């Protein structure tokens, strides 16, 4: 999620602490089984849909819509001391570098800062979203809410087959929303390299004596290579790089 806050302008890994929620695109429509979007390493792929009708990405941003019981169920992100303490709030960062102190325990600080939008009704919440993104259709959002409530009551998600036990209806309000953007906590991408593990410049020419191995420019590119994949990247490309580098002329050769 993105804070939309000029004072704290960054994105944050988020998770819903309960099941009384659903996600919508910019137009107010559900688009996925919310519990099957993928991991933090690749879930952003789901958000890359392009809609010719609006000539834009219709899921950037998306919105997580949830109720008071979900808000009260736990925090939406991580705090200092948690199992996933890393990034711009880590406790071992110098104060001059740390951007913030991590997520609050009750979500209230983020609500007060405006990172979480709220409205007494779905319509009011939709209007708050629309102030940020004019493409939000409040009537469509309300219809999506009513459809989700019906699916939850029936115990069957007839649109995306979300597991029945997770289809918890939203309560009577207030309602909340967070903006969702594609992002990743992976070591993906990096520089392009050639068959010798040499790093290439933007014109795809080798940069002399600069090599890459492991996830830094990995061959899988958009897929996170876990379960041994990282080690394989290090070993294979490290050997390729070493073989090529060992054949170079010495630095101090006359």
Image: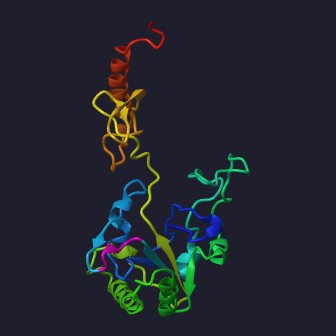
> Does residue 96 sit above or below 30 in this rendering?
above
Image position of 52 (left or right of 217): left
Dividing the picture into quadrants, the one containing residue 119 is bottom right
Q: Nearer the viewer, residue 204 or 108?
A: 204
> Does residue 93 sit above or below 211 in this rendering?
below
Q: Magenta segment: does it hold 56?
A: yes
Quadrant of the drawing holding the C terminus: top left
Q: Magenta segment: does it hold 246?
A: no
> Does residue 104 sit above or below 196 in this rendering?
below
Residue 199, x across and y down, in percent: 38, 33
Majority secondary structure in the magenta region: loop
Residue 50, x across and y down, in percent: 29, 70
Image position of 171 (left or right of 195): right
Dividing the picture into quadrants, the one containing residue 38 is bottom left
Q: Which residues are magenta?
A: 54-60
Picture residue at 39% right of the left edge, 57% below the top: 39
Picture residue at 52% right of the left edge, 67% below the top: 2
Residue 103, x across and y down, in percent: 63, 64
Picture residue at 38% right of the left edge, 61% below the top: 44
Dividing the picture into quadrants, the one containing residue 184 is bottom left
């Amino acid at each position: 999620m993105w804070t939309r806050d000029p004072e704290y302008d960054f994105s944050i890994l988020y998770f819903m602490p309960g099941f009384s929620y659903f996600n919508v695109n910019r137009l107010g429509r559900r688009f996925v089984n919310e519990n099957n979007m993928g991991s933090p390493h690749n879930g952003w792929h789901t958000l890359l849909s392009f809609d010719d009708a609006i000539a834009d990405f219709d899921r950037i941003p998306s919105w997580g819509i949830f109720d008071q019981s979900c808000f009260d169920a736990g925090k939406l992100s991580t705090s200092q001391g948690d199992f996933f303490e890393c990034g711009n709030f880590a406790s071992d960062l110098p104060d001059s570098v740390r951007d913030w102190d991590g997520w609050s325990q009750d979500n209230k600080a983020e609500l007060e800062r405006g990172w979480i939008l709220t409205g007494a009704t779905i319509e009011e919440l939709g209007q708050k979203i629309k102030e940020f993104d004019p493409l939000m259709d409040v009537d469509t959002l309300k219809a999506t809410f009513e459809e989700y409530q019906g699916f939850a009551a029936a115990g069957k998600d007839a649109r995306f087959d979300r597991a029945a036990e997770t289809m918890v209806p939203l309560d009577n309000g207030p309602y909340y929303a967070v903006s969702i953007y594609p992002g990743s906590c992976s070591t993906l991408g990096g520089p392009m390299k050639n068959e010798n593990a040499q790093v290439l410049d933007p014109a795809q020419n080798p940069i002399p004596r600069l090599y890459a191995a492991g996830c830094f420019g990995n061959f899988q590119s958009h897929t996170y290579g876990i379960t041994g994949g990282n080690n394989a990247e290090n070993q294979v490309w490290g050997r390729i790089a070493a073989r090529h580098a060992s054949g170079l002329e010495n630095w101090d050769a006359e």
